Amino acid sequence: MKKKSLLITGGAGFIGSNFIPFFLEKYNDYHLINLDALTYAGDLENLKEVEKNLNYSFVKGDIRDQELLFHLFQKYEINGVIHFAAESHVDNSIKNPTIFAETNIIGTLNLLEIARNHWMEQPFVYKEQYVGARFYHISTDEVYGSLGSTGFFTEQTPYAPNSPYSASKTSSDMLVRSYFHTYGMNVVTSNCSNNFGPKQHDEKLIPKLINNAINGRQLPIYGDGKNIRDWLFVEDHCRAIDLVFHEGKAGETYLIGAHNERTTIEITEYICEYLDKVFPKSKSYKEQMQFIKDRPGHDFRYAIDASKIEKELGWKAEISFEVGMVNTINWYIRKYSKMVEEL
Ligand code: NAD
């Protein structure tokens, strides 16, 4: 039987490189083509375990390159897309917003356009061999802006992005939406909360805290550290993506979150207390905590009401915050203590 050809964009990043091994392990009837530009955020080390898998191919390339996308759709007869590729770090978007517009907006538009031309005869009519071909867009809860101390984001919450990053993701969500309404394309979008787990880039909060802690550097905390994020273990997210891709309704949006609201201080203290137990030093790691000037436009709180995906698709986060954190911290201890030894 001919395998289905699924284009994964940004598969060498944090979530993509957790998703690809998970998906290859679960299914044998897909060929995954991972298209990644290998920006500073992509790392093929994270995909070592699948590089020899016959159901996996890697292509180094950019979603802004229309010719390459056209060629890949022809060559592999792509009949599904899961689109992870993005510039994803809010701090970088504050320093250099342009690349966020180029990758997150124009890159997404290119993919939609090439997929539409490859899959469809005309609006609302798919070519026979591409009936069912789906475009799945991975997005963020940051498109909804900031919550006060109560309430939750739902699929009905109006978009209100506050950073150049979330504004660029908002634009891409809107483009995906428009391809459903204008062309009848089989699209689906999910917006998830902050992920945590192995393979995340050193610049992000949890890896950075662990790296700095182990290396005796200060643990920087923006503002008063009371900003709240709703943490989702990346493995739970991968299961949700699988479900939305296969069973989500075309044109719909699903919010994914695990009801794990924590302030930055709570996350930092959790990491310090765990390190104090497993990697003790003469003083507690908490003494390295340092409050620094707040990020401009820093959203106060994100929290997700995931009841739609829970009720309609039967998804539920399975891994508790504590188990996910232990798994995550141990992974980074191994990574960063190896680096310390190698110095
Ligand atoms: P990441 O920054 O770790 O990885 C992004 C990947 O995309 C990298 O491998 C990078 O090389 C690649 N890439 C960047 N620009 C590219 C381009 N122009 N062409 C091809 N590849 C390119 O991101 P992540 O944390 O894995 O996030 C994946 C997706 O999930 C993003 O769309 C992000 O907006 C979304 N998301 C992430 C989180 C989170 O907590 N990490 C939360 C909500 C939503």
Image (cartoon, helix red, strand yellow):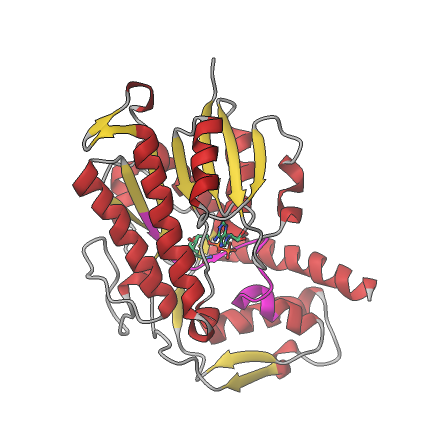
Residue 156's x, y, as percent? 18, 55
Q: Residue at x 82, y 67 (%)?
A: 343
Closer to the camera, 88 or 317? 88
Residue 82's x, y, as percent? 41, 40
Judge whether 230 appears above or below 162 on screen.
above
Residue 305's x, y, as percent? 27, 55
Q: Is residue 251 magenta?
A: no
Extreme residue toward the right, this view: 342
Magenta range: 190-209
Closer to the camera, 226 or 297? 297
Closer to the camera, 46 or 123? 123
Q: Is residue 228 left or right of residue 330?
A: left
Residue 288's x, y, as percent? 63, 81
Q: Residue at x 30, y 26 (%)?
A: 132
Q: Residue at x 43, y 32 (%)?
A: 73
Q: Is residue 318 visible?
A: no
